[in-house]
Image: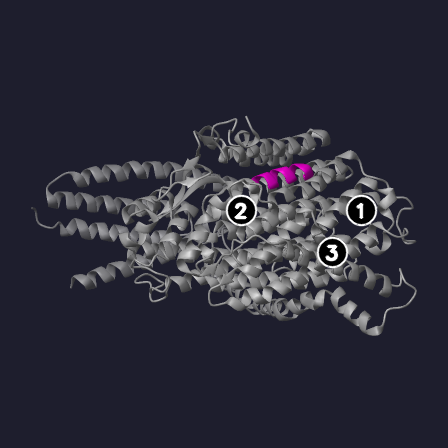
């Protein structure tokens, strides 16, 4: 049996494994429950064991599920019936656990889907997640809140798995909110420190803004699908291989927000023969008169705002650098490797809808590029090792958004994976540096760690090379694939976007080289700073260095996916692997003519061009660094340089701008509402006023109660007399 | 149907007014009590008068009920009067005006 047929023979049959997909989520959830409720009783060792083993169990199941998605029997790959009609989805496992809730014709099922896209992410989440759990057992060995920490971390993993495995937008949103909550809990993990608690709140509130947009986008999609079923005819769906009756049955069974249904909808949209096209006005419902394409663009832009919140893009990126207040392994897992890539995952998952709207695609790409450039420039002048890495994460996420926006989805996912490896490695390396140096985070007060922390240095060095994009590490290929796609794909009607973004992208790669070289040099090279907290750093235990080592190996090794190994396909391995997921998007793009996707491979010339840019940037970075910084050269920096540096160091005053433009007015309005509406109207008039009136009336009336039974009887007698008189008058 | 027994009704009204007057103006709790009995009996008389007018015995049944209740009321009421006398040494209503503001 050769290697490739081994990959295509899963040890557990797909239809058997599909029944157990829920366990991938349930295991870490159970771990979170046990650690959170009984953790203090169980003690540190048991909590470590439970937290790590649940994630490890999830990892094993994920590997089996991933394997099963490529299973073939008699040369036919595993496929899932498409309830909406049309061709079955190939290379996917799917398990519907029944209706979660339904109202009218709206229905949400608890359906789990594992295809090549979510399978890849499952491996990253549980694999990197397990390494980080292992690392955390050592990192948190002196912390009293270990049980709380592991409960939150397990909860995060469970929620992230829900996010990628959900087969509809609502279940995805559950995971989306869940990871936001876990992130909030972990950023504010040391809640007794006010600044850290505030950082948690900032992250949560910034994310809420995005989540709100996400919800509105979902509602628009639901309305859009509803309008489509009313207006469309069989001719719309025939090219997709379905009929209105089958599509409607699918909606009845699975609901309007399932990705399978949305894909069928998206594929029916651009076909020329049907009654409904992108520029058809909607005939009825709340969106009457608007065109399908227009509403779709708005929905996609709302999803972009949602993704900007979660994935830290402009204008909502400000929470991520502050999120570094949490423990470092958290920064590695949540704020570098997994959660912040949720936006990229969202757009990859809905690639078939995104390609219908060149406007939305261009916006996604431009937002990504702008964020990436801004964050990279801010990273130039940060002195906190974690802050530099945080801005670097924002910048790399921006690159992924560029890839998604320009329709080169597989490269964005590929960069997501490689970035998860090397950025997790960098963050864990930073954690190891802090652990060995008395929690020192200022890179100016580190230095010379190369000899003292050998394994940390080696892995950090490899990860730095990978993120900088040095040939032949994985970062080079994933980044190059994105920039190649940006260069060669064209958005219909918006051709200038690709022309502008390619040089910007190359500039971003150069910036990456600059700040990573600076970070690396200051931390590991040169002499040990005289201001260092401890005289001699100590290397961390193998619990911490083993994950570092594995991640470093993965940052090198994942480059194999960038080569075209397959004998009968010119595509890169990753592109070929993800093509079952993205082929719908490609087909729609070519039918609708919205995006021109170029499948040409990068040539040697392209590689050399990118390589030279990176090399020059690295050299310039090192040179400028030597020249201007007092700690390394003897000359003081010129005033202009210092002024620029101050602006950059203060993050271009974006936080201050937001404070002035948004937070102050909101605070002022809240103050007015508090003083006028709450204090005056509600508290004083409504609440205390009612009580006051009741008390006054009561104290006036109490003089009527004399205690004289005969007086009461007299009143009764008078009333009786009155009643009798009334009755007599009535009669006559 | 028999004619309206005007005489009995007027006698009952007079007894009721007499009893109510006593309840309202007398100060001795025992006398007040007796006046209540007077009012009850006025009511009984009315029942009987109307029973005669209608020619059936529902009014008689009601009168027996009233007598039974009045007996119970007399037992409880006298017990209260005795208890008040024991604790305060007086059955004057003026002296037991304590349930007030």
Looking at this view, is A490 or A286 the one in front? A490
Question: Taking the image as drawn, is residue A314 in sight?
Answer: no
In the rendered view of the protein, which quadrant contains the C terminus of chain A? bottom left
Left or right side of A210 for A252: left
* Distance CA(mark 2)–CA(mark 1): 45 Å
Q: Are there few (<14), some (14-19), or many (20+) residues within 10 Å of tag 3? A: many
Q: Which residue is found at the position 63% from the left and 65% from the top?
A: A503
Magenta stretch contains residue A128? yes
Q: Are there few (<14), some (14-19), or many (20+) residues within 10 Å of tag 2? A: some
Asked if badge 2 and badge 1 are on a common chain, one would say: yes
Which of disc 1 and disc 2 is earlier in sequence? Answer: 1
* Distance CA(mark 1)–CA(mark 3): 14 Å
Point out residue A447 in the picture as x, y percentages from the top left corner. Answer: 86, 51
Element type at mark 1 = helix
Question: Taking the image as drawn, is residue B56 in sight?
Answer: yes
Element type at mark 3 = helix
Identify the image's colour scheme: rainbow, by chain, secondary structure or one colour.
Answer: one colour
Q: Which portion, as a residue range, is magenta?
A: A122-132
Q: Residue A570 carries which label?
A: 2
Which of disc 3 and disc 1 is earlier in sequence? Answer: 3
Q: Residue A388 carries which label?
A: 3
């Amino acid at each position: 049996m050769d290697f490739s047929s081994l990959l295509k023979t899963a040890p557990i049959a797909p239809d058997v494994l599909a029944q157990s997909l829920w366990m991938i989520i349930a295991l870490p959830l159970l771990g979170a429950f046990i650690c959170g409720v009984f953790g203090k009783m169980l003690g540190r060792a048991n909590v470590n064991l439970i937290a790590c083993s649940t994630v490890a169990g999830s990892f094993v199941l994920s590997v089996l599920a991933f394997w099963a998605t490529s299973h073939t029997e008699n040369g036919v790959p595993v496929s899932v019936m498409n309830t909406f009609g049309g061709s079955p989805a190939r290379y996917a496992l799917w398990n519907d656990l029944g209706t979660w809730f339904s109202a009218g014709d709206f229905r949400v099922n608890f359906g789990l889907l594992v295809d090549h896209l979510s399978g890849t992410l499952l491996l990253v989440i549980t694999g990197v997640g397990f390494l980080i759990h292992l690392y955390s057992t050592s990192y948190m060995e002196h912390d009293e809140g270990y049980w709380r920490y592991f409960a939150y971390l397990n909860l995060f993993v469970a929620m992230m798995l829900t996010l990628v495995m959900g087969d509809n937008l609502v279940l995805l949103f559950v995971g989306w909110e869940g990871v936001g909550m876990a992130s909030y809990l972990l950023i504010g993990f040391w809640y007794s420190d006010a600044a850290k608690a505030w950082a948690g709140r900032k992250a949560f509130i910034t994310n809420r803004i995005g989540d709100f947009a996400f919800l509105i986008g979902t509602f628009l999609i639901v309305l859009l699908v509803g309008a489509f079923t009313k207006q469309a005819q069989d001719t719309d769906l025939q090219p997709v291989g379905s009929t209105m009756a089958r599509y409607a049955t699918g909606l009845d069974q699975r609901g309007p927000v399932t990705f399978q249904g949305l894909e069928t909808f998206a594929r029916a949209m651009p076909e020329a023969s049907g009654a409904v096209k992108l520029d058809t006005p909607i005939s009825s419902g709340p969106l009457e008169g608007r065109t399908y394409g227009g509403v779709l663009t708005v929905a996609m832009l709302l999803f972009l705002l949602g993704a900007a919140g979660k994935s830290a893009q402009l204008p909502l990126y400000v929470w991520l650098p502050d999120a570094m207040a949490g423990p470092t392994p958290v920064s590695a897992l949540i704020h570098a490797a997994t959660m912040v890539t949720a936006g990229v995952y969202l757009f990859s998952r809905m690639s078939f809808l995104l390609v219908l709207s060149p406007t939305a695609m261009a916006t996604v790409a431009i937002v990504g590029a702008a964020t990436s450039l801004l964050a990279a420039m801010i990273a130039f002048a940060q002195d906190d090792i974690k802050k530099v890495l945080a801005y670097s994460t924002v910048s790399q996420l921006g690159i992924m958004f560029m890839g998604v926006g320009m329709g080169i989805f597989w490269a964005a996912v590929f960069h997501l994976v490689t970035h998860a490896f090397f950025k997790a490695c960098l963050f864990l390396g930073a954690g190891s540096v802090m652990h060995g140096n008395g929690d020192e985070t200022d890179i100016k007060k580190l230095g010379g760690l190369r000899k003292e922390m050998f394994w940390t240095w080696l892995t950090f060095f490899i990860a730095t090379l990978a993120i900088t994009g040095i040939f032949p590490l994985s970062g080079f290929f994933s980044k190059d694939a994105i920039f190649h796609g940006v260069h060669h794909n064209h958005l219909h009607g918006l051709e200038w976007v690709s022309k502008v973004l390619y040089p910007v992208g190359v500039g971003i790669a150069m910036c990456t080289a600059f700040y990573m070289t600076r970070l690396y040099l200051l931390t590991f090279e040169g002499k040990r700073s005289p201001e260092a907290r401890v005289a001699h750093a100590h290397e961390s235990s193998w619990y911490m260095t083993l994950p570092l080592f594995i991640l470093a190996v993965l940052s090198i090794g994942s480059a194999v996916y960038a080569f075209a190994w397959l004998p009968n396909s010119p595509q890169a391995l990753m592109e070929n692997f993800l093509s079952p997921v993205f082929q719908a998007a490609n087909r729609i793009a070519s039918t609708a003519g919205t995006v021109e996707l170029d499948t040409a491979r990068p040539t040697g010339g392209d590689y050399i061009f990118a390589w030279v840019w990176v090399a020059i940037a690295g050299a310039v970075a090192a040179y400028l660094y030597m020249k201007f910084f007092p700690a390394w050269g003897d000359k003081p920096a010129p005033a202009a340089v210092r002024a620029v540096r101050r602006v950059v160091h203060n993050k271009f005053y974006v936080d201050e701008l937001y404070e002035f433009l948004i937070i102050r007015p909101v605070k002022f309005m809240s103050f007015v509402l508090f003083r006028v509406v709450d204090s005056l109207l509600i508290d004083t008039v409504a609440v205390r006023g009612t009580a006051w009136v009741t008390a006054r009336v009561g104290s006036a009336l109490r003089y009527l109660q004399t205690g004289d039974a005969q007086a009461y009887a007299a009143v009764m007698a008078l009333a009786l007399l009155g009643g009798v008189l009334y009755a007599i008058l009535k009669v006559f | 149907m028999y004619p309206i027994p005007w005489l009995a009704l007027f006698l009952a009204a007079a007894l009721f007014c007499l009893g109510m007057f006593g309840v309202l103006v007398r100060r001795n709790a025992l006398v007040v009590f007796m006046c209540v009995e007077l009012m009850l009996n006025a009511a009984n008389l009315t029942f009987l008068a109307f029973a005669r007018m209608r020619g059936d015995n529902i009014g008689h049944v009601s009168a027996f009920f009233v007598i039974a209740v009045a007996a119970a009321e007399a037992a409880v009421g006298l017990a209260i009067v005795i208890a008040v006398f024991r604790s305060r040494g007086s059955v004057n209503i003026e002296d037991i005006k304590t349930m007030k503001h």
